[in-house]
Structure formats: C-alpha cells, structure tokens
Image: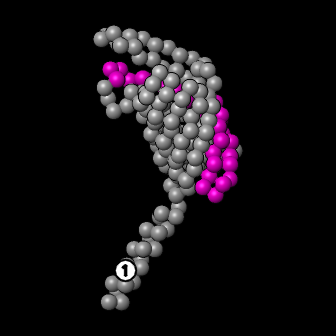
C-alpha cells in the first residue's frame, strides 16, 4: 500500500508541476493598411490573394501585468477554399522581453471578419525554446484573442 501511495503522489506531483508552467494571456492588436497585396484568379475563376502588413498590440497576462508588442505578418488565401482553413498567416512578433512566431489557420466569417487558431514558437528572450497555442478573432484592422505558453 505504501508503494502505491508513493507512486500516486509522484504522478500527482508530476502532473501538477506540468500544469503550473503554462502562462495564459489575452491580447488586443491593431494592424496598419497592407504594405503589399496581390491577387490572382484560380483556373476555376475564384480569386485568391496574399498580403503583408504590420501593427502593434498589448498583451494582458493572467496576473494582470501588461506588455506591448509589434508584429509583421504575411497572409495568403488558399484556393479553392474547401480545405479546413480558408487562409494561412505567419507573424513575426517583437516584444521587450523577447521575440516569437505565430502561425495561424483562419476562416472568414464575413468580408472583414475572421477567426483563427494557431501555434506559438519562441525565438529569443523569455520565449526562447517555448511553444504555445493561440486563438484570434479579427474584424477590420482590430483583433483580439487568448493563448498560453508552455515551458
């Protein structure tokens, strides 16, 4: 019985430590007008396109602290729009405490609104070697969402 109790305590300690390392956050951002955009027609006549843009935003961490960031993104629609995502987007994010990439899959909800899910990959500072997950809702030039970083 003692061995089973010690084994269960070790499992609880291991899973509790893992769960405690996630850092959750919310964010709000604004993008500038696209610096570059292009479009074309697929053989079936549907339009697809790509754009590059930048912007800035603010993160609110679970403990209430706030931090600012800037970003540069590239997005491209995926004809014929019958895959799981209608577009893909990649963003390079710079913050005072480090840099990271976000890779999104997005679906359009209207002409100026989209919902996205994605992954985070830390490249420097406190984010180096970390990964995470993020969701985003965008309307016009504004977006907001939630996420979490894992150690």
Give the labeled residue for mark 1.
Answer: 7
Nearest the eye: 65 or 97 = 65
Q: Residue at x 43, y 32 (%)?
A: 106
Q: Residue at x 48, y 42 (%)?
A: 135
Residue 30 located within the stretch drawn in magenta: no
Relative vertical location of residue 77 with respect to residue 120 in this rendering, above or below? above
Q: Main secondary structure of the magenta part?
A: strand
Q: Determine the secondary structure under disc 1.
A: helix
Q: Position of residue 14 (x, y in %)?
A: 44, 70
Can you tell which quarter of the image residue 68 is in? top right
Residue 37 can be seen in this image: yes
What quarter of the picture does the N terminus occupy? bottom left
Nearest the eye: 151 or 113 = 113
* Chain part drawn in magenta: 55-81
Nearest the eye: 32 or 50 = 32
Relative vertical location of residue 11 with respect to residue 53 in this rendering, above or below? below
Q: Position of residue 26 (x, y in %)?
A: 58, 46
Q: Position of residue 124 (x, y in %)?
A: 60, 46
112 relative position to 5: left or right:
right
Q: Position of residue 59 (x, y in %)?
A: 63, 45
Relative vertical location of residue 150 with respect to residue 28 in this rendering, above or below? below
């Amino acid at each position: 019985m003692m061995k089973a109790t010690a084994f269960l305590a070790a499992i609880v300690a291991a899973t509790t430590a893992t769960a405690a390392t996630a850092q959750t956050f919310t964010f709000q951002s604004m993008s500038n007008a696209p610096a570059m955009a292009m479009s074309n027609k697929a053989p079936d006549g549907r339009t697809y396109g790509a754009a590059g843009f930048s912007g800035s935003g603010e993160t609110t961490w679970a403990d209430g602290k706030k931090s600012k960031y800037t970003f540069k993104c590239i997005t491209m629609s995926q004809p014929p729009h019958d895959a799981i995502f209608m577009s893909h987007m990649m963003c390079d994010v710079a913050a005072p405490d480090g840099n990271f990439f976000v890779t999104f899959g997005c679906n359009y909800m209207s002409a100026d609104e989209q919902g996205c899910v994605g992954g985070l990959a830390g490249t420097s500072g406190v984010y180096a070697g970390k990964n995470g997950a993020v969701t985003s809702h965008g309307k016009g030039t504004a977006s907001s969402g939630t996420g979490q970083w894992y150690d």
